[in-house]
Image (cartoon, rainbow, N blue to C red):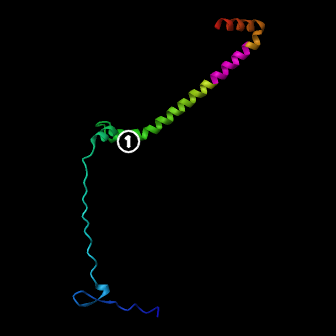
């Protein structure tokens, strides 16, 4: 029974006629009435965003070059921090060597300078 085709469905229309269900006209598309109330655009936001007539090219350049600038400044800051750390270590090393090599004269001079500073 599964190989047999489905029997044709017959329906009765409101005017009394009988028709096959597969020959019925398709439903008409529904018309949707949509009222959109839109305020005029706020030009102030656009002027601030685009730089008062500079255009979208400036915004695109800012979007593209902004992260590059942040990356470059971060790299420069990291290099300066490393150089400052190396200078600190070298200064500490020089002071330590001078104190150890200077002997009693160097210690006495450091002691006198320490008293004057206070």
Principal SS element in the magenta part? helix
Residue sitting farthest toward the bottom: 1
The residue wearing badge 1 is 60
Task: Identify the magenta region.
Answer: 86-98
In the displayed orientation, state which residue is furthest to the right: 104
Q: Which residue shows up at 50% across the image and 36% down it?
A: 71
Considering depth in this image, is 74 or 27 the residue closer to the camera?
27
- Work out which quarter of the rendered image holds the C terminus and state it: top right
Q: Residue at x 69, y 16 (%)?
A: 94
Residue located 26% across and 46% down the image: 41
53 relative to 35, above or below: above
Residue 110, placed above or below residue 71 = above
Which of the two residues, 67 or 29, is positioned nearer the viewer here?
29
Q: Secondary structure at mark 1?
A: helix
Find residue 68 and report its horizontal and vertical position in percent. 47, 37
Q: Is residue 96 magenta?
A: yes
Q: Is residue 62 left or right of residue 98?
A: left
User: Within 10 angstroms of label 1, few (less than 14), some, or many (20 or more) residues?
Assistant: few
Question: Where is residue 46 shown, x and y percent of the image?
Answer: 31, 41
Describe residue 101's horizontal placement relative to residue 117 as left or right.
right
Image spot of residue 82 (x, y percent): 60, 28
- How many numbered badges does the structure rendering display? 1
Residue at the image point whose x is 72% and y is 13% from the top: 98
Question: On the rendered structure, is 56 left or right of 69?
Answer: left
- Confirm whether the magenta stretch covers residue 93: yes
In the figure, 102 relative to 34: above or below?
Answer: above
Residue 86 screen position, x and y as percent: 64, 24
Quadrant hosting residue 32: bottom left
- Quadrant for residue 29, please give it: bottom left
């Amino acid at each position: 029974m599964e190989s047999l085709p489905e029997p044709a469905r017959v329906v009765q229309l409101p005017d009394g006629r009988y028709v096959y269900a597969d020959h019925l006209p398709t439903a008409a598309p529904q018309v949707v009435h949509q009222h959109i109330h839109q305020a005029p655009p706020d030009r102030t936001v656009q002027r601030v965003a685009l730089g008062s007539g500079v255009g979208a090219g400036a915004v695109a350049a800012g979007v593209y070059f902004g992260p590059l600038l942040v990356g470059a400044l971060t790299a420069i800051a990291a290099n300066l921090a490393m150089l400052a750390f190396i200078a600190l270590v070298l200064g500490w090393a020089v002071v330590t060597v001078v104190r150890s090599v200077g002997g009693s004269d160097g210690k006495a001079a450091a002691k006198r300078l320490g008293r004057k500073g206070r």
